[in-house]
C-alpha cells in the first residue's frame, strides 16, 4: 500500500493527475490498518472507494480468529489442521488469490468514469494481490489503455507459494494468468533486478525492454525529526513482521555472546511489529529475554521514530527460494535513518548490494555466526568511544520517493 500511496503523493507536483480506485475500508478486510497514512493523500486527488466480495468473513468464523492472514501467512499457525485446510482452499479455489472478488467492483467503477466521458492516458495496477493485475488485463482488452503492471513481488515464485499445496491444474492456471499479464502489459515494473530476471524468464515472448526496475524507497518528509540514539544503551531495533523463516538464531547467539564478553556495554534489542511466537522463543533460548523489548504494531510515523531513536538496525530476509531479489521496503527507511544495518540474509542479494553501495552495512548468511559476532564487536568498540554511530554520506538519497516517482513519470 505504501508504494502506491507514495507515488500518488508525489505525482500531482510532477504534473500527473492520478485517479485512485481502491476498496472501501468498511467493506474490505485487512491484517492491520494505519489510518494515519490517509493524511498523505493530496487534497486534490480523487479516490474512488468501492465495495468488494471477499471470503475473509467466512475464514474468521471458521478459524475463530479475529485477525485475517497476511499474504505470506506470517501470522498463522503451521500446525492447525483448519488453517492448513484454509491454505489449500486458498491455493486451489481462489486464483490468483482471495482478493479477486474485488475485480468486478473495480471494473464497474472504471466503466462509470469512462461512461461520463472521462479520458485517461494510462492505467497502473500494483500487486500483490496479483489478482489486481487481472483488472489491468481486462482494461487493456476492453479499452486499449496503455498499461503499466507494477509487480512488487514475484507471482508464482513468491516465497510462500509452496505452503498453498496447489494441485497441478491450479499451478497451470496460476502460471497462465501470470504469463498473460506479463505478455499483455505495455510495461512491467519490478522492485528489484532479481525479480525482473525471474519474470523475464516466464515467456519467450518477453523482451528486456518491457521491464523497468523502480525500487521501493523512503519519503524525505518522514525523516524531519532528529536522530536521537540512546546514550545509555547500544540499542538494535527491528521493525515490521518477523517469523522463524527469517532464521535469526545465529545473530541472537552472537548478541548473547557480546553481552557476556562486554558486560559493561548495555546491549539491547527491540522488536516493533508482528513477532512470531517462534522468534520470541528463540530470544528466550539465547538468554536475551531481559534485554529485549517487544512492541506491537504502531502507526508508520511512530515506527520511523523508533528507527531514529536506535543505535543500529536489524533487517532479515526470509530463507526461502528466490530470495536474492527480496528487497523489503524497510531497507530504504533504514538507510534514510542513517544507522548501521545488520542484515541477516544471502550475500550477493539485491539487498546486500544496496547496503554495500550506500556504505550502511552488509548481509550476513544465516549460519555465519563468526562474521555476525565480529561485526557486533566492531559496533561495540565504536559505541564505547561514542554512543552515536550515525553514518555520514547521502548515497541513499537516490531512493527518495520523489526521485523514484520522477522515474515513473518519465515512464508514463
Image: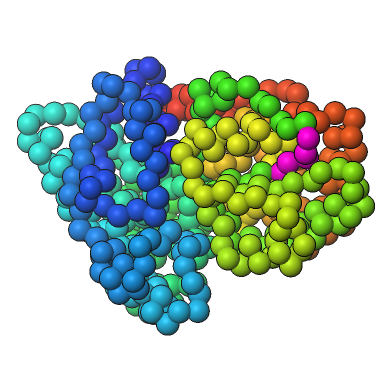
In the rendered image, residue 69, in percent from the top left (x then y), is placed at: 40, 62
In the rendered image, residue 12, in percent from the top left (x then y), is placed at: 34, 20
| Residue 238 colored in magenta in the image | no
Q: Main secondary structure of the magenta part?
A: strand
Which residue is depicted at the point 20% across and 37% down? 48
Way the structure is coloured = rainbow
**Horizontal arrangement in the rendering, residue 312 relative to residue 87 (left or right):** right
The front one of 304 and 90 is 304
- In the rendered image, the vertical position of residue 258 relative to residue 333, given as above or below: below
Which residue is depicted at the point 50% across and 74% down? 78
Question: Which residue, as the protein is rendered here, is positioned at the far bottom?
Answer: 81
- Quarter of the picture holding the C terminus: top left
In the rendered image, residue 388, in percent from the top left (x then y), is placed at: 78, 28
The answer to whether any part of residue 322 appears in the image is: no
**Horizontal arrangement in the rendering, residue 296 relative to residue 245 (left or right):** left
Residue 309: name its quadrant. top right
**Horizontal arrangement in the rendering, residue 355 relative to residue 170 (left or right):** right
Q: What is the span of residues highlighted in magenta in the rendered image?
A: 232-236
Amino acid at each position: 500500500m505504501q508504494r502506491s500511496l507514495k507515488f500518488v503523493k508525489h505525482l500531482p507536483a510532477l504534473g500527473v493527475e492520478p485517479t485512485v480506485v481502491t476498496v472501501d475500508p468498511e467493506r474490505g478486510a485487512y491484517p492491520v490498518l494505519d489510518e494515519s497514512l490517509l493524511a498523505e493523500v493530496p487534497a486534490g486527488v480523487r479516490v474512488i472507494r468501492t465495495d468488494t466480495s471477499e471470503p475473509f468473513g467466512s475464514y474468521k468464523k471458521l478459524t475463530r480468529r479475529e485477525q485475517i492472514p497476511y499474504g505470506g501467512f506470517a501470522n498463522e499457525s503451521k500446525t492447525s489442521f483448519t488453517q492448513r485446510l484454509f491454505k489449500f482452499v486458498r491455493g486451489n479455489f481462489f486464483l490468483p488469490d482471495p482478493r479477486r472478488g474485488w475485480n468486478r467492483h473495480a471494473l464497474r467503477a472504471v466503466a462509470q468514469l469512462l461512461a461520463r466521458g472521462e479520458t485517461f492516458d494510462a492505467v497502473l495496477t500494483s500487486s500483490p494481490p496479483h489478482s489486481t493485475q487481472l483488472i489491468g488485463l481486462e482494461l487493456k482488452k476492453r479499452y486499449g489503455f496503455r498499461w503499466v503492471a507494477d509487480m512488487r513481488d514475484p507471482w508464482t515464485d513468491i516465497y510462500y507459494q509452496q505452503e498453498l499445496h496447489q494441485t497441478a491444474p491450479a499451478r497451470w492456471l496460476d502460471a497462465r494468468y501470470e504469463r498473460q499479464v506479463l505478455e499483455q502489459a505495455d510495461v512491467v515494473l519490478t522492485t528489484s533486478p532479481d525479480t525482473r530476471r525471474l519474470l523475464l524468464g516466464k515467456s519467450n515472448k518477453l523482451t528486456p525492454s518491457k521491464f523497468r526496475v523502480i525500487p521501493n524507497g523512503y519519503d524525505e518528509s518522514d525523516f524531519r525529526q532528529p536522530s536521537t540514539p540512546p546514550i545509555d544503551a547500544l540499542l538494535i531495533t527491528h521493525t515490521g513482521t518477523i517469523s522463524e523463516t527469517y532464521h535469526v538464531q545465529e545473530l541472537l547467539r552472537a548478541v548473547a555472546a557480546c553481552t557476556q564478553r562486554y558486560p559493561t556495554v548495555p546491549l539491547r534489542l527491540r522488536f516493533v511489529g508482528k513477532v512470531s511466537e517462534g522468534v520470541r522463543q528463540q530470544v528466550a533460548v539465547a538468554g536475551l529475554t531481559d534485554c529485549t523489548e517487544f512492541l506491537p504494531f504502531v502507526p508508520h510515523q511512530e515506527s520511523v521514530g523508533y528507527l531514529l531513536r536506535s543505535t543500529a538496525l536489524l533487517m532479515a530476509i526470509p530463507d526461502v527460494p528466490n530470495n536474492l531479489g527480496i528487497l523489503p521496503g524497510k531497507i530504504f527507511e533504514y538507510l534514510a535513518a542513517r544507522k548501521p544495518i545488520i542484515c541477516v540474509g544471502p550475500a550477493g542479494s539485491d539487498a546486500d548490494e544496496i547496503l554495500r553501495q550506500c556504505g550502511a552495512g552488509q548481509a550476513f548468511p544465516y549460519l555465519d555466526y563468526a562474521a555476525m559476532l565480529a561485526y557486533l564487536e566492531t559496533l561495540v568498540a565504536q559505541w564505547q568511544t561514542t554512543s552515536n554511530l550515525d553514518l555520514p554520506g547521502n548515497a541513499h538519497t537516490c531512493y527518495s520517493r520523489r526521485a523514484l516517482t520522477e522515474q515513473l513519470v518519465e515512464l508514463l
